[in-house]
Amino acid sequence: MVARPEDPKARAVRVYHGAVATNGKLTAKDYKTDQEVRWCPGCGDYAILAALQSFMPELDIPKERIVFVSGIGCAARFPYYMETYGMHSIHGRAPAIATGLSTSRPDLSVWVVTGDGDALSIGGNHLIHALRRNVNVKIILFNNEIYGLTKGQYSPTSPIGTRTKSTPMGSLDHPFNPLSVAIGAEATFVARSIDTDRAHLTDVLRAAATHRGAAFVEIFQNCNIYNDGAFDFVRDDKTNRIYLEHGKPIRFGSDGEKGVRQRSDGSVEVVDVGDEAALLVHDAHHAEPSAAFALSRLTRETCGSTPIGVFRDVDRGVYDELMAEQVEVARQANAGGLAALLHAGDTWSIS
C-alpha cells in the first residue's frame, strides 16, 4: 500500500511517479498519459476510460504496481491511455499473459481489458480457463456486439440476423451471453454495467477490485459507427434496468411495479409485483452458481429488460496463492535441492 504522507521518502517516490493531491494521494489526472486518445468521436470507450481513471486512486496502490493487459481491438488501446504499466498483447491471449504475470507477481494489481470479439472468439479458451482457475485478475469485457476495429463484422455476441459486411444476409450464429459463459465457467465474481452510468460502473469496478480471485465485468459499450444504439433500451430507458442489490427483493420499473420471481424449475421470470414476498431476493454470495445463471438469462429478447450489477461474488481458493503454497511444500519436501528433486521417485541406471 502507499505509505503515509508523513513518510518523506514515500512522498518523494509518489511525486516522482506523478503529482499528488494535497492529501498525499493520487488523483484521476495522475492516470492520464500524454498519448492522444484515438477512438471514434462518441465512442463509449471514452466514458469507460474516464471512469477507470477516476476510480484508480481508490485502490491506494502505487502506479508501478498496477498493470493493464489487452489483446487486439478498439478496447485494446487502453494500456496507452493509463499511466501505469501495461501491455498491448496478442489477439485473444490477454488472459493467458495476465495469468503468468499474476502468478509470478502476486504483489501486482492486474487488469485485463478486452472486447466481445477478442475475448469470446479467438480468446474464448483463455478466458474460461482464467475464470475457472480463479486467477487473481480483473477482466473487463467491452461488449458492443460487433467487431469495431476491423470495420464492422459480426461478433460472437451479435444477435441472430445481424447484417454486416461479413453476414450481408444476416448472421445465422446463435450469440454468446458473456455472463452466462463466465458463470458457466464458475467464475467467482461476475458483474455487468453500462458505459454511460458512471456511478453504477464505478460501484461495480470497486467491488471487482476488492474481490480476491478472477473478477469478470461485462460493460455494455456503444459503437456509434458500426452498431449504434445496440443498448439504447437500457442506456436511455432506466426503467428497463433490473438493478441487482444483494439481500434485496429484485424489483424494477418506474415505480418498482415489476419484479423477478423464481419458477419451480429454478429459472426466473419477470412479473407484475403483487406480493413482494414472492419475489426473488438476490443472493450474490450463494455458493451455487445456478441462481446467478438464471438471472443472466433475463435479456431484452426474453423479457424486455436486462439485469445490471453484481450477479455473483463468492470466495474460493485463489490460484496464485494455491500455487505459492504448493511450491513451498515442494521446496520443504526436497531440501536436497534441484538435483535431489530430479532424481526422486522412479529412476534407473543404464549400464
Image (spheres, rainbow, N blue to C red):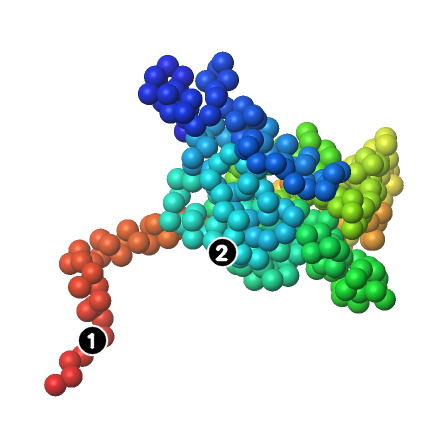
Examine the image and state in which quarter residue 334 appears. bottom left
Q: Kindly identify the amino acid type of the residue bearing the numbered disc 2.
A: Ala
Position of residue 66 relative to residue 214, above or below, is above
Lower position in the chain sequence, tag 2 or tag 1 = 2
- Residue at 41% in and 25% down: 16
Kindly state the secondary structure of the residue where label 1 is placed.
Answer: loop
| Residue 70 percent coordinates (x, y) | 55, 49
- Residue 291 seen anywhere in this rendered image of the structure: no
In the picture, measured across the screen, residue 3 lies left or right of residue 35, that is left
Picture coordinates of residue 12 (x, y %)?
Answer: 37, 21
Identified at 71% across, 52% down, the residue is 148
Residue plotted at (79% across, 38% down): 235
Disc 1: which residue: 347
Q: Which residue is mark 2?
A: 96
113 sits to left or right of 349? right
Residue 179, percent across and down?
66, 51
In this rendered view, identify the residue nearer to me: 77 or 285: 77
Quarter holding the C terminus is bottom left
The x, y position of residue 166, in whole percent, is: 77, 64
Q: Residue furthest bottom?
A: 351
Residue at figure coordinates x 86%, y 32% from the top left: 254
What is the three-letter code of the residue carrying label 1?
Thr
Which numbered circle lies on residue 221? none
Query: In the displayed image of the protein, which residue is found farthest to the left?
Result: 351
- Residue 189, quarter of the rendered image: top right
The answer to which image quadrant residue 13 occupies is top left
